[in-house]
Amino acid sequence: MTFQRPVLILVTWGLMLVLAGWYASNRMVVDNNLTSFLPAPATAPQRVVWQEFREGAGSRVWIIGLRSISEIPDTAGLAEVSRRLAEHLRTSGHFSQVHNGAVTMDQDLGDLLFRYRYLLADHAGSFEAVALESAFHERLIELSMPYAPFKEGLIASDPTDAYLGLLESLAELSSGGGLSSSAGVWIAGDGRTAVLLADSRHSGMDHTAQALALASIEGGLAFPEFENAFEKVLSGAPYIALQVRDETQETSVRLSLVATLLLVSLTAWVYRSMAAVVMIAVPLGTALLLASVVTALLYGSLHVLTVAFGVTLLGVSMDYPVHVLSHRRAQERLESTVRRIWPVLRIGVVTTILGFSAMIWTDFPGIAQLGVFSVIGLACAGLTTRFVLPAIAAGSDHPGPRGFAKWVMDRESLRRRRGAIAGLLSGLTLAGLAYLATADVWHDDIGGLSPTPRSLIVQDQRIRQQFGLAEPGSLLVVRAASQEQVLQKQENLQAVLQQAIDQGILSGYRMASQWFPSQATQERRRAELPSDAVLSQRIRGAAAASGFAEGVFEQFRADVEQSRKLPLLTPPALRGTNISGYLDSLLFDFEGGGAGLVRLLGVQEYPALREILSASGLKDVWLLEAREEINRAVQQFRQELLSRLAIITVVVLGVMFVMLKDPRRVAKIALTVAASAVLALVFSGLVFGSLNVISLISVMLIAGIGVDYALFFTQPCEAEGDRLATVHALMVCALSSLFVFVLLGVSGINVLQSIGVPVSAGVVMSFMISLVLAGPVLGRNHV
Amino acid sequence: MNRAGHLFLLLLIMGLSFHVWGEPAGQDFNIDVLLQFISENSAGVVDYTEKRETPLRDEPVESYGQLEFIVPDTLIRRIESPVQAEFTISGQQVTILRDGRSKSRKLDQMPGLRGLAESLRATLAGDRERLETYYELQLKGSPEHWKLVLTPSDEGLEQVIESMEISGAGALISEVTLFDRKGGKTQTLFDRSGQQPGTG
């Protein structure tokens, strides 16, 4: 027994929809990884920075500002709310650390550092007899200083000041940048905002955990003393990620709803039939669902921007069913209409798919995903139109009224002035090309690609500036086979950087090895501690010479002896203390080995610094400016995409030539696409003031649309009714695409706006240009 | 009158005299009056000598120098012996100058020390509120011979300092004695012959 072909198609189609629907509603994960829209890191230092960006300690930090509503600074009040929130957050379990003032020494950390003072602090030479005597003498002098009562307690156990030196370098390293402490808490430069930094226990991209963290912060501020006199200001990577997710999801849903509503109204009005609406919805729905599911299966999750991008797919793939509906002759079976226009429609589908495939083979995970999504979506829409539509709409229906298409066709003036309009368009296109080639419009700033709304980025920068938390601009990346070897390498680097400081090239630096020495160094220091007998003798001599009482330094002697037996300290020993987060942000695992970041302060001359570093002969130490590095990668990607586009263009032209076997027609189509793309880019450049990689992706969308319009407009056809149908179909296509892309253009999300604006312009241009070039459709006066 | 009567009389006289002696001379000699009195006359330079008794040494450690107060909140201590050094507390900033090098710190970063710095500065400035942020105050004696006892209430301070006694006559501070928790004691005498706070 055999099934009829339509039944087989319907069963297959229905089964796929059911499976995809089940997956989409039960299994599909939508992610919001900000680094998806970074180009894939090409070099090792880029990989280190990318990893830090994505999952580093910095990506977990909440920045919390508590600002008093009143203009009058109330330091005591600020300190009180800051302490209260910090206490709440510390006990909430959501944060590994909460800082609301300069790093305070908790008892455990203090004890640990004190016990390990002779391994952690550099004691080279300080146990020599002369050095001890001079240290003791200095301690004696300090007994005359105003702080003597505080110092005296440490003299007996730490007469060489090893512990204090350690604390001092730690305080300097972990100071809150431009934040000043008042009444023990950080206060921003405005004097009325207390600042807290809270490190989440979970990844900044773990939205569920971060939503709980946010709730905890809000809960910690729900007391009347705060609510009456203060307001909160939030920022930091986890907060931004949450906001982006919420906003992008909200925008996507809103866009989809509005777009659907508009498209349904448009088709219902144009075709005066709900059946027509259903026939358009079927390929679109199938395309969106299958493209989402297949993409999610391929990538493990679907990026939130891909979801939003799905809307653009509506704008292009809607054309396929529209052509079928508009081209339908009176009393014609749908199957026949589809078969009749399929040869032309097929070229449009194939060339558009080819265009989008350029995005797939890129090193830009987010953009590759958009490419995969589009290609699958377009293919599904095309196939559904070709095979499923005829199967579900077996009966015949009459095409709707075509009054407005007839109106366009009857414009005598348009026909008469074709030559003039074509000349004007050519001139404009050439001028546009010149503008794109010469003007400084191409910008490779990553900001344009970020799914983060510009307003949030600006707010974060403002808050960081106000709070004195500005990210240091430049870094050294140090990589080695293990964290221990990173520390060793950093210890060698210290002399090099000191040399740079002495030459005025650099004002300072922060790195892990400055206060957390490698095990090799700890071992050496331990071995260099004097034996008990030697030390006892030296202490006796130095104490007598400086006038300290007998036996005062007994604790010191015992502690040094104890230090000679201490096991070496490793970074995990600091876990859970106040400074572990600080250490984690500077020293971490990387690709099976270790990597460290050195934050450079006040770099004056990069070339000179590069020179000193390369002269040092240290391997796997790279100087980089994070932002510059990212922008460079974006620029490389733009050039790569541009060359891919060139190749794809040649391929598409070849395919069209083979399928159409009409060079003249192919030339017209190419001209339409080229002119529309150039003019749309110019328009977009004028609107935004700059163009970026996303503009190039828009070109592909424009090309897909332009090829479609030009194909149909240049199709040879004699019957008046068919010509009318073509104009009608293309008008509906253009209007529906315009709706969708204008919606994107005003969406408020960078990436979508960068697509919406040029493609809207491209739709208008493609329609007008192909109409003007369309000899056969307008009849008479062949060009 | 028997012995018991004498004794009673003696007690009565002593009690009376104690009562007379204990009563402020002016109608209302109290902390506010004293602090205001001090602050009105506190600007200027005074010589000091200091003696610190410490369990670390058999002999006390001695030093001397000058103390200068500049209205409203700058206190400078210039140490001349055993080494040359200068400590300036101005606003929230401490600056230490020694061997030609200067180091600055925020008072906030030094819990405990902050309170110690305020003991004399807030007294000279007559700022009772600030003084009471760190200490409980107790006034003894008369305007001619008073003693202001400062007992730390600040956590960081309390761990190190037992108490502090500032004594003087009229608007002049003549002596500050600091008792450490661990048995140390610092006695600072202000030289009456030179210029000093209260005369400037």
Image: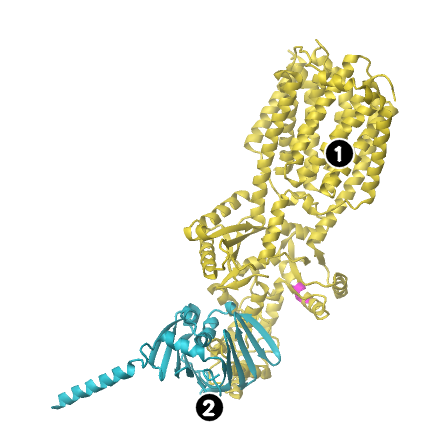
Chain colours: A yellow, B cyan
Marks 2 and 1 in Cβ contact (< 8 Å): no
The one of A493 and A340 positioned closer to us in this rendering: A340
> Is B21 left, or right, of A345 in this rendering?
left
Which quadrant would the C terminus of chain A be assigned to in this image? top right
Label 2: how many Cα within 10 Å (few below 14, some 14–19, many 20+): few
Main structural element of the magenta stretch: helix, strand or loop? helix
Which residue sits at x=36%, y=80%? B147
Residue B133 makes an appearance in the image: yes
Which residue sits at x=54%, y=32%? A26
Q: Mark 2 points at which residue?
A: B193
Answer above or below: position of B69 versus A294.
below
Percent position (x, y) of residue A448? 69, 44
Answer above or below: position of A383 versus A451.
above
Percent position (x, y) of residue A616? 74, 65
Q: What residue type is labelled 1?
A: Met
Question: Which mark is on residue A604?
Answer: none
The quarter of the picture where residue A390 lies is: top right
CA distance for labels 2 and 1: 94 Å
Residue numbers of the magenta segment: A488-492
Residue A704 makes an appearance in the image: no
Q: Mark 1 points at which residue?
A: A700
Helix, strand or loop under label 1: helix
Percent position (x, y) of residue A594? 64, 56
Q: Is residue B187 magenta?
A: no
> Is A9 left, or right, of B56 in this rendering?
right
Which residue sits at x=50%, y=75%? B71
The quarter of the picture where residue A259 lies is: top right
Which residue sits at x=61%, y=17%? A274
Specify the subunit that label 1 lies on.
Answer: A
